[in-house]
Image (tube, grey):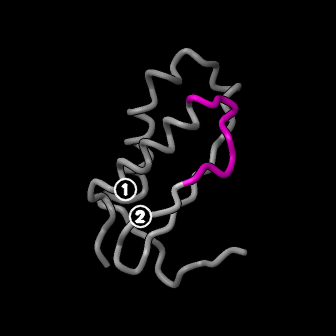
């Protein structure tokens, strides 16, 4: 089942800031891999009504287990360190 919220989560600096953060923090581990070999990964998470982040999980793999683990950890760190915009 999938639920689409009335108001999607917003990030301080916008979604592009989150993407830039992930690219910067994962550059070292991905720089030696051919870009064509890395699959797009998808990470889901829930933002509760009180603004807490939970259920951060990988839904689609990059094809590299270590990269997947690192990206999940980076997303958790980013979201739990105050980058969600208060509604």
Mark 1 Cα within 10 Å, few/some/many (few <14, many 20+)? some
Q: Which residue is mark 2?
A: 53
* Residue nearest the viewer, comparing 76 with 10: 76
Label count reads 2
Q: Quadrant of the N terminus?
A: bottom right
Q: Which residue is mark 1?
A: 79
Residue at image location 50% in from the left, 67% down from the top: 46
Q: Are marks 1 and 2 in contact (CB under 8 Å)?
A: yes
- Which residue extends farthest top? 32
Q: Quadrant of the C terminus?
A: bottom left
Question: Residues under labels 1 and 2: Cα distance?
Answer: 7 Å
Q: Position of residue 45 (x, y in %)?
A: 52, 61
Q: Is residue 83 left or right of residue 20?
A: left
Task: Check residue 36 for magenta coloring.
Answer: no
* Foreground disc of the pair 1, 2: 2
Residue 38 picture quarter? top right
Residue 5 picture quarter? bottom right
Q: Is residue 59 left or right of residue 27?
A: right
64 w.r.t. 43: above or below: above
Q: Position of residue 52 (x, y in %)?
A: 37, 68
Residue at image location 36% in from the left, 62% down from the top: 11
User: Magenta segment range?
Assistant: 57-66
Q: Position of residue 35 (x, y in %)?
A: 63, 25
15 w.r.t. 29: above or below: below
**Of the image marks 1 and 2, the number of the one nearer the N terminus:** 2
């Amino acid at each position: 089942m999938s639920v689409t919220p009335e108001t999607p989560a917003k990030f301080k600096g916008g979604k592009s800031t989150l993407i830039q953060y992930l690219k910067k923090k994962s550059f070292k581990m991905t720089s030696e891999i051919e870009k064509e070999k890395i699959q797009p990964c998808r990470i889901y998470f829930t933002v509760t009504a009180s603004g807490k982040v939970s259920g951060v999980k990988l839904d689609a793999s990059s094809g590299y287990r270590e990269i997947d683990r690192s990206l999940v950890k980076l997303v958790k760190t980013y979201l739990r360190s105050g980058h969600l915009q208060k509604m």
